[in-house]
Amino acid sequence: MERARRVAPGTHTHPDLRRALGGVAASTVRLASVDPVTTEIVRMRCAKHHDCGT
Amino acid sequence: MGSLSAMSTQAVLERVLGDGHAGRGDVLHEMTAAYTAAWTAAAPRLLELCRVRIASMLGCDAEVAARTPDTGLHDDVVTAVAAWPTDPRFEPADRACLAFTEHYVIDVASLDDATVEAVRIHLGDAGLQDFVSALLVIEQRIRLRLVWDRLLGGH
């Protein structure tokens, strides 16, 4: 489902928080104790739940 | 691993992720940094009210009982957070953010434009974006803590 933007173009998250969120995502996907198929299934399920097209 | 339920959420994170297992220390470091940044990016008063509301909705007693320092909130206001729709101690910005938060926790994908716009009116575009990002950090941290409580000996 396409939605209209809810914030103005060019709006960015506070740099410290943006950098930290990127760090959480990057460090999490580097973990190797869960197999890639399970990781991908969970990622896709979360994306669907959160209505995220990526 | 013993009971986690009496520990602070940060202590739980350190217990679980600080075990020396490959990569977990990096996750702990980044999650701690994100939590610190969340309180820098969003107004502490709003984030504290929303943190406690999320904790009460999800049944996380430790987070309901915890208090973040320097939020400017009196404890009686924090403990009354569930009454925000009618309690006069809650300001218009509090109400907008708490309405957003409740909808966010229940079904984030169905958040409607009016609920989002109500927050944007008070915080502006950048403030809305920072608030939502900070809320994400808070909510994920509480949910993760609850999972670990259940799986690793909280009850």
Image (spheres, coloured by chain):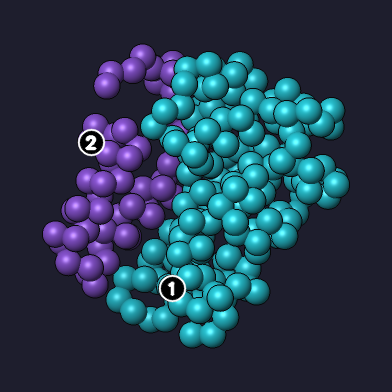
Residue B72 in view in this figure: no
Left or right, A4 with respect to A31, comes to right
Above-or-below relation of B144 to B42? below
Above-or-below relation of B48 to A32? above
* Residue marked by disc 2: A54
**Chain coloured purple here:** A
> How many residues crowd around disc 2 within 10 Å: few (fewer than 14), some, or many (20 or more)?
few
**Chain coloured cyan here:** B
Report the chain holding disc 1.
B
**Helix, strand, or loop for circle 2?**
loop
Left or right, B16 with respect to B75, comes to left
Q: Amino acid at mark 2?
A: Thr
Report the chain holding disc 2.
A
Residue A43 percent location from the top left of the image: 25, 50
* Tally of numbered tags: 2
The residue that appears at 84% across and 28% down in the rendered structure is B88
The residue that appears at 85% across and 47% down in the rendered structure is B76
The residue that appears at 61% across and 30% down in the rendered structure is B99
**Helix, strand, or loop for circle 1?**
helix
* Residue marked by disc 1: B151
